[in-house]
Image (spheres, rainbow, N blue to C red):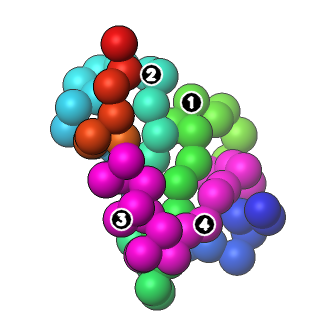
Amino acid sequence: MDSSNFPVAGWFKSSYSSDSQACVAVCFDSGRVLVRDSKFEGPSDASPTLAFTPTQWAGFTSAIRTADLT
């Protein structure tokens, strides 16, 4: 997805990621949940970005919380 239509401000990393570089950044914007790789070294407005609806995001994060990741 071309992220040039998305805002630069409002991105954050999880508090669980500490100082880790291996994480994603999330932005809640206009009824969308945007996700990008926090390690992307180019301009933030050029970062490849995924877009979810709030319902899709809720399902995704719920599945992660209940998954057995061992």
Q: What residue is disc 4 on?
A: 51
Q: Are marks 4 and 2 in contact (CB under 8 Å)?
A: no
Provide the secondary structure element on which disc 1 rests: loop
Horizontal side, residue 56 vs residue 4: left or right: left
Quadrant in which the N terminus appears: bottom right
**Span colored in magenta:** 44-63
Point out the residue furthest to the top here: 70
Horizontal side, residue 1 vs residue 63: left or right: right
Residue 39 in the image: state x and y as whole percent. 56, 30
Q: What residue is disc 2 on?
A: 21
Residue at horizontal 57 percent and vertical 39 percent from the top: 37
Residue type at mark 1? Lys
Q: CA distance from mark 1 to mark 4?
A: 18 Å
Q: Earlier in the sequence, mark 2 or mark 1?
A: 2
Judge whether 34 appears above or below 39 on screen.
below
Nearer to the camera, 5 or 68: 68
Q: What residue is disc 3 on?
A: 58
Q: Are marks 2 and 1 in contact (CB under 8 Å)?
A: yes
Provide the secondary structure element on which disc 4 rests: strand
Residue at horizontal 27 percent and vertical 41 percent from the top: 65
Residue at horizontal 64 percent and vertical 35 percent from the top: 40
Q: Earlier in the sequence, mark 1 or mark 4?
A: 1
Q: CA distance from mark 2 to mark 1?
A: 6 Å
Q: CA distance from mark 4 to mark 2?
A: 21 Å
Q: CA distance from mark 2 to mark 3?
A: 24 Å
Disc 3 residue crowd, few under 14, some 14–19, many 20+, Cα 10 Å: few
Q: Nearer the viewer, mark 4 or mark 3?
A: 3
Q: Earlier in the sequence, mark 1 or mark 3?
A: 1
Point out the residue furthest to the bottom here: 30
Q: Earlier in the sequence, mark 4 or mark 2?
A: 2
